[in-house]
Amino acid sequence: MFGLRHATLMATKQRPQKSHCGYVKRALTPSTKNREAPLYGAEPNAHIFQRHRNVSLPSKASNGLPTFALKSSLLAVSSLHRDGLQDLAFRYKIAAINTLAESAKSGPPGAPESAQHAAACMLLATFEIQHHSESSGQWVFYVRGAKHIIQTTGLDERSEAELNPLLDWIYYLDIMSWFVMRHWRHSSTLPQSTTDTIAPARGKWPLLLNRTQSVRKVLDPIAAILDILVEPHDPRAKTVEYQSQLIQLEGTLIDKLMLKTTITESDAEEDIITELYRLATLVYLCCGSASPCIRDRRLDALIDRGFYLIKKLNTCERTFPLILLGSEARNDEERMVLLELIQRTEASHNDSNLMRTKTGLAMLWSQRDLEADEDEYSDLSYLRRMDTVISSACTLPFFS
């Protein structure tokens, strides 16, 4: 199986001695430590287990290697969520990796087993995202493995409802990996097998395009922008075709922004977050392209709207809109709004990505302040600023 051999070499061959079935109940029991820590996005462990139990425990393969690998990866994340990076969590992770490698040697898997392989890879990616270490940047390696599995087995073309959460999950992390890889300048720190295939190739749309409209309408514009965006000084940026693509993307995003003048109690937090994603994507397009076809007053209106919505949130785990909208904070008041929101979120969610976001914002604001004071910094483009911030991390960061 693609993506598992390298991981196996990094792990020692050992399996946990405790009963994995008995630990499920304990691991998913609410704990006073890290009670609100997300599994991926904003969903807690019990919710994820409930959504993926049909993929996890199919009746025809409940005792096979794929099932054991998936249970082990789930328990690794559950243990990490409950008790932090302890020996038990690490042993479950190793068991999952070893079992996946062993299962891959047993011949081509069927559809249920392939789904379990992909889900196990995604849980291993989640494990890497949720803890900070020298290897935590390898989450993109596991996402790549899961994506390869569903492509080669045709799972992305199946219409089974129980697969939709898994496929949406892969699609979401795949697009987020596009964003960080677009700005990551240390490709040698990644497994060599992923450095060429993760980065979006010009003219190629992301895979898994048959996802639900509710998912695609948020993520597709991000993928499209990452696929075509070039530095403003690049000769391609001057072509008519490129400018036409920018205008088309801008129009698509504007059309999807159903702006309201007020936010009422009936507005779900999910709706606010969805609009923040679209606003952040449009700000990224406007600033990254530096296109003369985009007026400053439109950008100001987008930023105004973004901070209006941010002020309505008590917490926000979604760091992708925070880093993009926050990078354009125009004064100390707006900066404090972001920092206070992150502080409130950190109080209820033990997530290292929030700390990385706060550090990244501080770097972006410092660069903007320098540009305002020193003419010699004025040539640093928006995309280069993002390059500097994202590449300053010791491992490949994750923005959700």
Image (spheres, grey):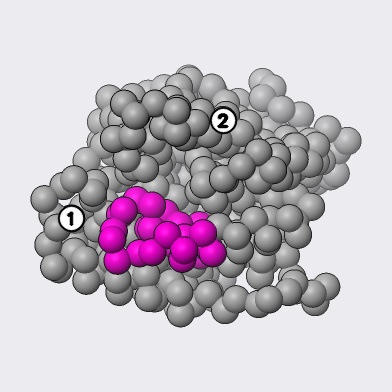
> In the rendered structure, which amino acid carries the disc numbered 2?
Ala
Image position, residue 28 (x, y; %)? 78, 46
Q: Is residue 67 above or below residue 132?
A: below
Q: Position of residue 243 (x, y in %)?
A: 21, 66
Image quadrant in which you'd find residue 263: bottom right
Residue farthest along the right direction in this orientation: 32
Answer with left or right where residue 58 lies relative to residue 376.
right
Q: Main secondary structure of the magenta part?
A: helix
- Secondary structure type for disc 1: helix
Q: Quadrant of the N terminus?
A: top left
Kind of residue indicated by mark 1: Ala
Q: Which mark is residue 237?
A: 1
- Residue 81 figure quarter: top right
292 left or right of 92?
A: left
Q: Residue at x 69, y 50 (%)?
A: 316
Per the rendered image, the range of residues in magenta is: 278-302
Identify which residue is drawn at 53% across, 34% down.
Answer: 365
Q: Which residue is mark 2?
A: 362
Q: Is 394 situated above or below 32?
A: above
Question: Is residue 375 or residue 104 the one in the foreground?
Answer: 375
Residue 168 in the image: above or below residue 85: below
Q: Is residue 118 left or right of residue 259?
A: left
Q: CA distance from mark 2 to mark 1?
A: 29 Å
Q: Can the viewer see residue 302? A: yes
